[in-house]
Amino acid sequence: MSDLRRIVVHLSDSPRARAVALWASSLADEHGAELHAVHAVEATPTAAYLTPEATTIATQLSLDSDRTRIEQARTLAEELGRQRGQALPFESVLGDPLPTLLRHARSADLLVLGQHDPETPDGTAAGLAGRVLMGAGCPLLFVPYADADGGPRPVRNVLAAWNDSRESARALRDALPLLRRAQNVELVRFVRGDDEVLPLEPLLQYLAAHGVRASGSVQRSREPSVGERLLSPWTPDAPVAEALLSRAADLDADLIVIGGYGHTRAWELALGGVTRTLLQSMTVPVLMSH
C-alpha cells in the first residue's frame, strides 16, 4: 500500500464506538485521508406472541429501538464531520453486518473496527471480526475495548510480527504508510525450541527501501506445560500471542502489525491460534491483513 486515501470506520452500538471513531478520525487527519462511517449492525430481534396486539406492540418497540440506534450512530458521524470541517459519508444498514462491511472494505485502504467485547452488546456477533478479516481484501485495524488511555494516540512505536508467510508479508506491506511515520519499528520473529532462525536482514533492507528504519529481534516463545496441552482452549500458538503482547508492553507499542490467519470451511470459520488470541486479548491496537 503506497498511502492511505480512504479509511472506513465501523460504528457499532457499543459505548466504545466514539473512541473507535476518534481513532479512525485521528488516522485520517494524519494521513490526509477521506473518512467514511458505516453503521452495520443486526436488527433488534422480534418474537411471536400469543395475541396479535402483543405482537404489534413488540414489533413497534423493536422498530423504535432500531431508529434510536441509527440516530445515535448518525449523530456520532455528524459530530466527527463537524470536528473535521466536512460532512462524513454515512450509511446505516440493519441486518447481517458482514456484506455491508465487506462492500465498504473492498473500496477502502483501511477498515477500522472496535474489538468485540463479550460483556457489552454492540449489535454484532462474536465471530464477525474474523469473517471480515477473511473477506475484506484490505487491512483491518482493531481498537481494543480495554484501551487504558481512552483515546487515540499517534502511532510512533510499532511492533511488527514476522514468520515468512504470505499473510505476514501482506500485513507488512499494508502497514507501510503507518510504518513510515513511526519513530520506532521493531520486526520480531518468534521461534520455538531449537527451530532454525532465519535472518531478518532482507526484510529490514526492504523496509529501508521504503523509508522505514526498523530493528529486528528474535524471541523464543516458551514451551507449553503438559497441563496447558491438555486444556481444550489451549492451542500451540497461544504462547506466541502471549509473548507478542508482552513484547508490545515492553516497547510501549502503539500498534501491533501481524498477518491474520484462518480459512473458511463449509459451516464455520477456523482462525489461527495467534489471530484468535489477539482478537480476544489485544491490549493495543492491532493491524491485521489476511
Image: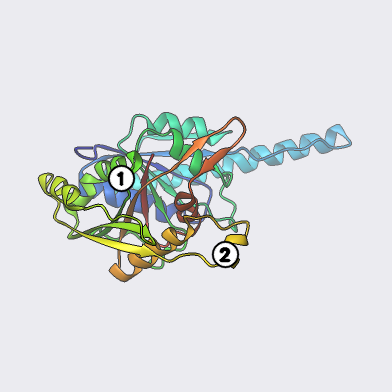
Q: Secondary structure at mark 1?
A: loop
How is the protein colored in the picture?
rainbow
Is 34 drawn above or below residue 280 in the view shown?
Answer: above
* N-terminal-most mark, 1 or 2: 1
Residue found 89% across the figure and 36% down from its top: 50
Q: Secondary structure at mark 2?
A: helix
Which corner quadrant of the image does residue 250 belong to?
Answer: bottom left
Is 60 drawn above or below residue 212 in the view shown?
Answer: above
Query: Label 1 is placed on what type of residue?
Result: Asp
13 vs 275, nearest the viewer: 275
Pointer 1 residue = 164
Residue 201 in the image: state x and y as whole percent: 16, 52
> Few, some or many C-alpha atoms within 10 Å of disc 2 (few <14, some 14-19, many ≥20)?
some
Residue found 48% across the figure and 31% down from its top: 100
Pointer 2 residue = 228
Residue found 20% across the figure and 43% down from its top: 32
Q: Quadrant of the N terminus?
A: top left
Q: Is residue 168 left or right of residue 179?
A: right
